[in-house]
Image: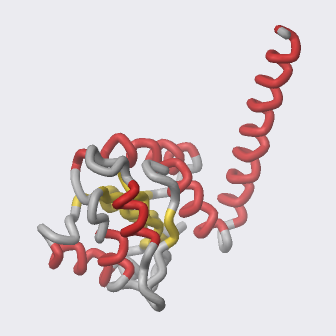
Amino acid sequence: MKKVGIIMGSDSDMPIITKATAILKELEVPYEVHIYSAHRTPVEARDFAVSARENGFGVLICAAGMAAHLAGAIAANTTLPVIGIPCKSSVLDGMDALLSTVMMPTGIPVATVAINGGANAALLAAQIIAVEDKELMSKLDAKRENDAKIVLEKDKNIQNNI
């Protein structure tokens, strides 16, 4: 199975990344987590992206706030799917990061999830890998069914208490 590479621009993004790694652990998808900055460590970020495919990665997730150039910088250096997680900052509540992540130029796509959307980034990464992995697809189907059961149980509880 291909690995998921998770890159965050700063260790302050770790609470968001923890949501992603929890999903990947649950689905038994291998992953690595790194801190590289598009601005402070551009050479290391580029080197990671350029060698990602040969190092066994199938999807890359990038989390960054404010200017949020990390996902775009990574996507510019690989043709692997890149998923951007715009991270909330104290300045514009993550809208700056959302717009920076989603507004990529033609030819350098970045799939973008919601602000602080670590869980959905991991699920999307798993779905991409599952295109060619039936066992992982079965796990995703089971998770989706279980999530639906949880909602229906909550509905039942509400109906019984009204």
Model colouring: secondary structure
Quadrant assignment, res 55: bottom left
Horizontal side of residue 48 vs 72, given as left or right: left
Location of residue 67 with respect to 116 vertically, above or below:
below
Determine the residue located farthest toward the top in the rendered image. 161
Residue at x 35% of width, y 60% of height: 96
Residue that protrudes farthest toward the left in the picture: 40
Residue appearing at x 69%, y 53% in the figure: 140
Q: Left or right? Give the position of 122 relative to 36.
A: right
The quadrant holding residue 12 is top left
Image location (x, y in percent) of residue 110:
47, 74
User: Quarter of the image containing the N terminus?
Assistant: bottom right
Up-down relation of residue 40 to residue 118 (above or below):
below
- Which image quadrant: the C terminus? top right
Residue visible at 31% across and 84% down in the picture: 50
Is 112 in front, or is 141?
Answer: 112
Q: Position of residue 92 (x, y in %)?
A: 33, 51
Q: Residue furthest bottom?
A: 107
- Residue 89 % position (x, y): 30, 48
Q: Nearer the viewer, residue 93 or 47?
A: 93
Left/right of residue 143 with respect to residue 66 in the rendered view: right
Q: Is residue 68 left or right of residue 18?
A: left
